Image (cartoon, rainbow, N blue to C red):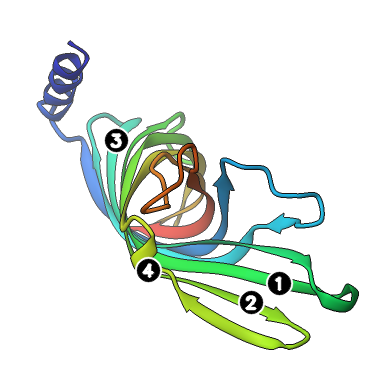
Amino acid sequence: MKKIFAACALVCLLSLPAFSSGLLFHFGAAITDIKYSETLPPDEPKKATLQFTGGFGYELSFTQNIALEFDLVYAPGGTSYTHPWWGGSTCKHTIKGYGIGLPVVLKISFLSSIKPYIVGGGMIGYTLSQKETYVNEDGSDEWDLTDDVNRFQYGLVFGGGVEFGLGSMRFYVEGRYIMGLSNLFKNPWPGEKATIQNIFIVVGYKI
């Protein structure tokens, strides 16, 4: 019943006359982290990593304040943590990956000239590479984890921003939180799960 209701709502939305449309281009920072089902020990602190993101999209507006946005983005991911090493030193592990993300979000804005807005929707992605490196006083090494993770990922997207005009161009600043729902582990132990937890902060322009 829920699927039928969702399908009917989508058909009704797409049947509305388009008010306007435009191409979107953006780039910015990605604060990436991984949430694990198990709690790490206190002496193994985990930190998010700072990476780059960018992409483009298409906005299809149905009214002056309601639109659907379809994006194609470069989607990085990862985290870092340290643990005790021999002789009182530490060993730092960094997990980094990148892939392609396809978010689809509903955008609701509130004003006409300077337009604050909120977005919400879903995202699917495909992992192209996943690697882990470690560094300690004895040296460093790297492992390729690409074949050990689920290549296809999905999750929810929430965020907001503000759009404004400069001359004939429209610019925007936006933040998004990506909450992964799928398990990164390809062959997890019972109850073992790791999910993507990313924040994207971007600037962009609309044609």
Spot occupied by residue 95 in the image (x, y as percentages of width and height): 55, 67
Circle 1 is placed at which residue position? Answer: 92
Kindly identify the residue that appears in the image at 70 percent across and 56 percent down.
Answer: 46
Circle 2 is placed at which residue position? Answer: 134
Whether residue 167 is visible: no
Q: CA distance from mark 1 to mark 3?
A: 44 Å
Q: Report the quarter where the N terminus lies.
A: top left
In this picture, residue 194 sits left or right of residue 150: right
Q: Which mark is residue 67?
A: 3
In this picture, residue 78 sits left or right of residue 109: right
Q: Amino acid at mark 2?
A: Tyr
Q: Which mark is residue 146?
A: 4
N-terminal label among 1 and 2 = 1
Q: CA distance from mark 1 to mark 2?
A: 5 Å
Q: Is residue 11 above or below residue 183?
A: above
Q: Marks 4 and 1: CB-CB under 8 Å?
A: no
Query: Which residue is nearer to you in this view: 7 or 91?
Result: 91
Q: Amino acid at mark 4?
A: Thr
Q: Residue furthest bottom?
A: 139
N-terminal label among 4 and 1 = 1
N-terminal label among 4 and 3 = 3
Q: Residue furthest right?
A: 88
Q: CA distance from mark 4 to mark 3?
A: 36 Å
Q: Amino acid at mark 3?
A: Ala
N-terminal label among 2 and 4 = 2
Question: Of helix, strand and loop, which one carries label 1?
Answer: strand
Question: Of helix, strand and loop, which one carries label 3?
Answer: strand
Question: Of helix, strand and loop, which one carries label 2?
Answer: strand
